[in-house]
Image: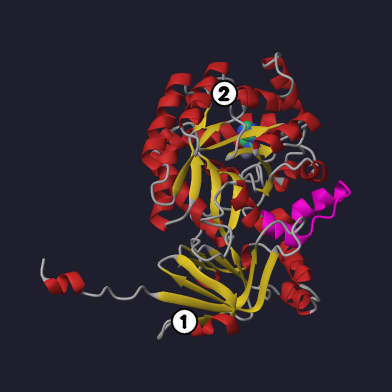
């Protein structure tokens, strides 16, 4: 190699910068007095896909590299990308399917819909639409259930990798109490999960989650095998459902008579720990809540799903006072919206019914930094801290005439966030950025509607 090749200077990395109101968190606003970090006139500087600085414009402007163009978003609000901690991508096409509760809904709609994911082309197409829908809602990280087919996980990861998104996903484990066409075995589920971990966990921004669907659809042998894989891979995620519906809870008690509670089954197989994420957690008792807190397992509160399926009301107050990690999730297709803003709307009302006032500031924390902290991902996503991956959302307070009128009269940051939570949805998401690149712009979003339904004359 010549001397000049050794000493040649690489071109300085391209910077981008955004001047806008900035909101991020240092901790939980319910517990830490200085948790909320808000700059009315802020500057966010991004380089090579990472945040290199976020602060007041006046404090940072001098650090801008010469020639950096500043994107003006002063009438918007920049927040970290939303994190949806529980969602099923194969259920995209069956969202809003009515049924009298969870178990009939699974039998009537969910299992037949998931059958189609044996077809890799269908899986890729659905994964692509699903990720675009998440981005249109400002969600840049999600914990995603695939189907029992390992190809369904390959499809989701491939589409996520193509967009350079940080996603956590896993193939469902299910070896009983489901149709034959969706059944794996303890051995094949173990082998497929191990293969997918090898292929995808920590490849770029992709991460794997062991995904036993819920206790009723796994034999003891399968839960045992899952626990063994979890021990082999302590940094891999675990996701499942627990205590969602009273019929389900009774069924579990019949299937696993030796256990103190539904949650205790997962505990017994070594499936409660950090990075273990349990959807719903509605019908838990105090002992269960204590175990969630002790083990650091995360409760995913899915209010739109719980209201839609009539599953029950998550007790925010009890979960919070037990010290359980809590985050928010859509649970599409049981959930009725991809939007974490709409999820906050319903979470607020569910908490209200329990006599608890869940502030918008807290809900924005739970949907961003709080989720990232509970998932041990806060060094990567969920904040605007220096060095973190530049996943962020530009929210538009004037997205609709009503939002514009309401936010024009706001008297505090809490009122602004409350208006976004109660009145906002994908229309309020002006732009979404992942690893510093714009991956959604509302005003030129997809117009085409595949398979537009024909309305009978
Ligand atoms: N419990 C087991 N599977 C599912 C599912 O797909 N959705 C919901 N909401 N609950 C479940
Ligand atoms: Zn679910």
Q: Is mark 1 within 8 Å of ligand 2?
A: no
Q: What secondary structure is found at the residue carrying circle 2? A: loop
How dense is the environment of label 1, judged by Cα within 10 Å: few (below 14), some, or many (20 and up)? Answer: some
Prevailing secondary structure class for the magenta stretch in the rendered image:
helix
Structure colour scheme: secondary structure
Whether 79 is drawn above or below 362: the answer is: below
**Disc 1 designates what residue?**
64
The picture places residue 394, in percent across and down from the top left corner, at 58, 70
The answer, for residue 446, to whether it is visible in the render is no
Question: What are the residue bounds of the magenta stretch?
Answer: 345-366
x 46%, y 55%: residue: 165
The answer, for residue 78, to whether it is visible in the render is yes
**Disc 2 designates what residue?**
178
Tell me if label 2 and label 1 are in contact, CB under 8 Å.
no
Ligand 2, image quadrant it occupies: top right
> Viewer-proximal residue, 322 or 453?
322
The picture places residue 110, in percent across and down from the top left corner, at 59, 35
Whether 232 is drawn above or below 34: the answer is: above
The picture places residue 98, in percent across and down from the top left corner, at 69, 40
x 48%, y 20%: residue: 186
Q: What secondary structure is found at the residue carrying circle 1? A: loop
Q: State the quadrant of the N terminus.
A: bottom left
């Amino acid at each position: 190699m010549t001397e000049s090749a050794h000493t040649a200077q690489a071109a300085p990395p391209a910077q981008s910068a955004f001047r806008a109101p900035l909101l991020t968190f240092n901790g939980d606003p319910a517990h830490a007095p200085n948790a909320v970090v808000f700059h009315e006139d802020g500057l966010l500087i991004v380089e090579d896909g990472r945040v290199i600085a976020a602060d007041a414009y006046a404090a940072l402007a001098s650090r801008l590299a010469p020639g950096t163009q500043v994107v003006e978003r002063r009438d918007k609000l920049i927040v970290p990308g939303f994190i949806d901690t529980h969602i099923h991508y194969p259920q995209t096409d069956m969202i809003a399917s009515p049924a009298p509760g969870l178990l009939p809904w699974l039998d009537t709609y969910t299992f037949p819909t998931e059958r189609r994911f044996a077809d890799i082309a269908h899986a890729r197409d659905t994964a692509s639409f699903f990720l675009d829908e998440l981005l249109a809602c400002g969600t840049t990280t999600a914990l995603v259930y695939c189907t029992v087919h390992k190809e369904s996980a390959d499809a989701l990861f491939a589409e996520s990798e193509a967009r350079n998104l940080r996603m956590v996903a896993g193939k469902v484990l299910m070896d009983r109490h489901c149709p034959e066409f969706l059944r794996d075995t303890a051995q094949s589920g173990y082998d497929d999960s191990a293969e997918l971990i090898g292929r995808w966990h920590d490849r770029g921004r992709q991460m794997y989650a062991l995904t036993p669907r819920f206790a009723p659809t796994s034999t003891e042998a399968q839960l045992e095998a899952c626990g063994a894989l979890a021990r082999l891979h302590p940094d891999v995620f675990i996701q499942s459902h627990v205590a969602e519906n009273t019929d389900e809870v009774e069924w579990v008690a019949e299937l696993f008579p030796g256990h103190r509670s539904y949650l205790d089954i997962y505990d017994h197989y070594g499936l409660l720990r950090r990075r273990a994420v349990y959807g719903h957690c509605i019908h838990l008792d105090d002992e269960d809540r204590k175990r969630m807190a002790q083990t650091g397992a995360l409760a995913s509160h899915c209010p739109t799903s719980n209201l839609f399926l009539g599953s029950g009301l998550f007790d925010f107050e009890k979960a919070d006072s037990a010290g359980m990690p809590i985050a928010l999730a859509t649970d599409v297709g049981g959930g009725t919206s991809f939007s974490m803003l709409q999820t906050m709307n319903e979470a607020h009302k569910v908490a209200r019914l329990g006599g608890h006032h869940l502030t918008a500031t807290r809900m924005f924390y739970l949907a961003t930094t709080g989720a990232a902290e509970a998932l041990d991902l806060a060094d990567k996503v969920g904040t605007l801290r220096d060095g973190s991956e530049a996943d962020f959302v530009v929210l538009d307070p004037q997205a609709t005439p009503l939002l514009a009128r309401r936010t024009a009269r706001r008297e505090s940051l809490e009122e602004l966030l409350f208006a976004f939570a109660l009145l906002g949805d994908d229309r309020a998401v002006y732009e979404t950025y992942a690893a510093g690149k714009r991956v959604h712009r509302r005003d030129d979003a997809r117009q085409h509607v595949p398979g537009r339904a024909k309305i009978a004359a």
